[in-house]
Image: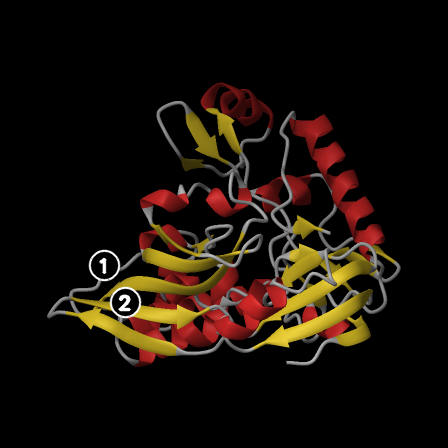
Amino acid sequence: MYIQKNISLKPFNTFGIDVQADYFVSVNSVEELKSVLSLNDYPNKLILGGGSNMLLTKDVNALVIHVNLKGIEIVNENEHEVYIKAYAGENWHEFVLWCINNHYGGVENLSLIPGNVGTAPIQNIGAYGVELKDVFHSCETIAIEDGSFANFSNAECDFGYRNSIFKQDAKGKYIITCVTFKLSKKDHKLHINYGTIASQLDTMNVSNPTIQDISKAVIAIRESKLPNPKEIGNSGSFFKNPVISKALFEKLLANFEDIPSYPVSDTEVKVPAGWLIEKAGFKGKRFGDYGVHKNQALVLVNYGNAKGEDILKLSKLIQDTVNRLFNINIEAEVNII
């Protein structure tokens, strides 16, 4: 364990924003993490996982703790189900592929989502009709304040749409060290009716899909729409899909006949934020070194040397324009730091 000074965080965030951290340390075990948290010489600390759900807008005057805990293990199983513990520093997509290669079902629709396992529960990641809460059993954490350990069950995490207790009452209080997932071993429940998965499977000439087929379909769809962060800096979807009242949706439908929606309840529907942003004229729009991706309006991008504050300013312009045109507030999904 070695604490470094004045380190660029550009390699540690998928937006590729070049800001400096006063101090930086990468921890490879729970014991190291507990030890670093107890250091009184660094009162300000920032926890960093995969760096995929954050926008850095300024230098970080703190000790940045990079959580790099590794390991995947089966903790329990029976004929139908398996419980798998994955540590926080494991890459999410690589974990998904590990599950699929071992014929464990439930996470295939979550293929190719950027980030690490430890940060996945915080915002209850989701895609194509599946959310993390659907496969989450529990997680182990360490309290930042005193280094004590605590477990959280699915119910205790209070999951919501891109939300959890770790973004609400427990925000900034705990570090997730590992997550236990409950997956199926056979008779997998397949989700193919959300988005374009069914049509992609048709393109692949697949009529009886396996979890491997669904994963390949999701990867193909995401690769066709979303830029690779290693090539163009981005954090995936920058905004949440807003949930609006059916009354407002009916009003919008009168002027925008092609507006898509997904039912949430008897009184609410979810509207794709990407559709709203595209209709507002931002899809593919570029402002020097930053802009909105040409294939997916949900994705804000850094073409090279953009500053975090530039991308933040663009996000606010998009929010204001969408609100003015549609009377809908779209919220940022990423953490602004």
Identify the residue at horizontal 46%, vertical 51% (top origin).
124
The image shows residue 100, relative to residue 334, as above or below, that is: below
Classify the position of the N terminus by image quarter: bottom right
User: Which is more N-terminal, label 1 or label 2?
Assistant: 2
From the top left corner, tell me how far across and down residue 4 is, in percent: 76, 77
Say which element carries label 2.
Answer: loop
Residue under numbered circle 2: 105
Q: Going 58% across and 52% down the picture, which residue do you hit? A: 145
Q: Are marks 2 and 1 in contact (CB under 8 Å)?
A: yes
- What residue is rendered at 38% in x and 58% in y? 139
Q: Is residue 274 left or right of residue 244?
A: right
For mark 1, give the secondary structure.
Answer: loop
Q: Which residue is mark 1?
A: 189
Query: Tag 1: Cα neighbours inside 10 Å, few (<14), some, or many (≥20)?
Result: few
114 left or right, relative to 164: right
Residue 323 sits in which quadrant? Answer: top right
Q: Residue type at mark 2?
A: Gly
* Nearest the eye: 230 or 276: 230
Q: Amino acid at mark 1?
A: Lys
